Image (cartoon, rainbow, N blue to C red):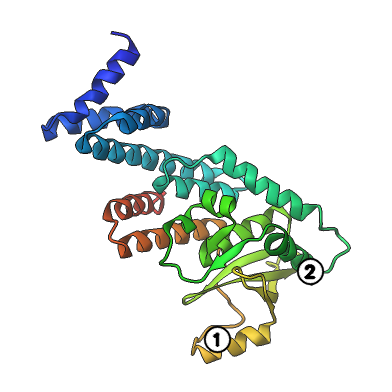
Amino acid sequence: MTDRNELNAIIQLLEDPDQEVYDVVANKLVEYGTSLVPSLLQVQYASTSDLMQDRIDTIIHQIQLKDAIEQFKQWQASNNPSIIEGLMIVSSIVYVQLEKETTMQMFEQVRKSCWLELNHYLTALEKITTLNSVLFNHHHFQGVLDMTKEEQLFNIEFVLQFKKGNMLSMGALYMALAQELDLPVKLIQVEDHYLLAYVDSQVSFMDLEQKPVESIQFFINPLLGDIYSMEEIDAFLKTQEVNIDKDNYPFHTNESLLLHYTENMFQFYTYKKAYDLADLLKAFLNAVKHL
C-alpha cells in the first residue's frame, strides 16, 4: 500500500460503529496534523453519512486545537508577538477554514492605507482622527454593540473581509493596527465596556532607570471611532455606577488580550449551547495558561 492508499483506508474506518476502533483511528489521524485537513474536508463533503461527517468535524477541530496550542507557544516566545498573528491563531480553533495568508493580506491593505495618511508632524489627536477616518469612512468598518448576536464577529478573517466586528474584535483590530503604526493605543475593559486609550509614556530625566509613567491623553470608541476626554469618560462611568481607579486603568497586554478574547469566545459558545466548540476553547485556555 502507498501512504496515500493507507491514509484513505484509515479515513474510511471512521464509519466503523465500534467506538474503540474510532478512538484509535481518530488519534492516528490527529497525529498527521494540519496537512491532513484538506483531505478530510474533501471526504466530508463527498460523504452522505452523518456519522462520518460528524466524526471528521471532530477530528479537524482536534487537529486545529493541537496546532493552535503549539503556535501560541511560539507566539509567546517570539520577541515581538503581533496581535493580528495571535487573533488568527485563536480564530483558527473554531473557524477551521480560516485563510491566514488572505487574512494577513487584508490586514496589510488596511494598515498601508492608514500609514499613507499619517506623518510625524501630526499631533496625537490628529493621528487618531486620521486613523478613524481611514477605518470608518474609507474602509467603512462597522461596529456591532451586541456581543451575543453573530459568532462570525469573533472571526478576524470575517471582520476584515466584511468590515464588521463586535466591541472586542474591533478593539483588538484597532489595537493591532495602532501597534503596527507605532501609535501607543491600548485596549481597556471596564465591566461590560471596551475602550481604547491613547497612552503617553513619560520618562523622568532625573532617574532614567525609573519605569516610564503612562498617562491617558484621551479615549477612543472602538465601534465608531468617537474620541472622548478623560472627563467625559469619568462622567459616563459615574452614570453607570462603575468604580475604578482613574490612575490605574487595566490596560491589556498583547497576551492578556488574546486570552481575554478566547475567554469571550468560550462564553459566547457556552451561551449559544455549542458546547463542543466551547470545550475546544476551554481546552486551549487550560493548555496555554500553564505555559
**Vertical side of 27 occupied by 110: above or below:** below
Residue 245 position in % (x across, y down): 56, 83
- Extreme-top residue of the structure: 1
Which residue corresponds to the image point at 81% horizontal and 57% vertical from the top-left? Answer: 117
Residue corresponding to mark 1: 237
Frontmost residue, 196 versus 204: 196
Within-10-Å neighbours for mark 2: few <14, some 14–19, many 20+:
some
- Quarter location, residue 36: top left
- Is residue 177 left or right of 260 when viewed as pictured? right
Front position in the image: 190 or 213: 190
Q: Position of residue 196 (x, y in %)?
A: 62, 70
Q: Which residue is mark 2?
A: 124
User: Could you tell which of marks 2 and 1 lies nearer the N-terminus?
Assistant: 2
Label 1 element class: helix
Q: Position of residue 29 (x, y in %)?
A: 30, 28
Name the residue furthest left.
Answer: 18
Rounded to the nearest angstrom, the CA distance separating label 2 from label 1 is 24 Å
**Residue 6 x %, y %:** 28, 15
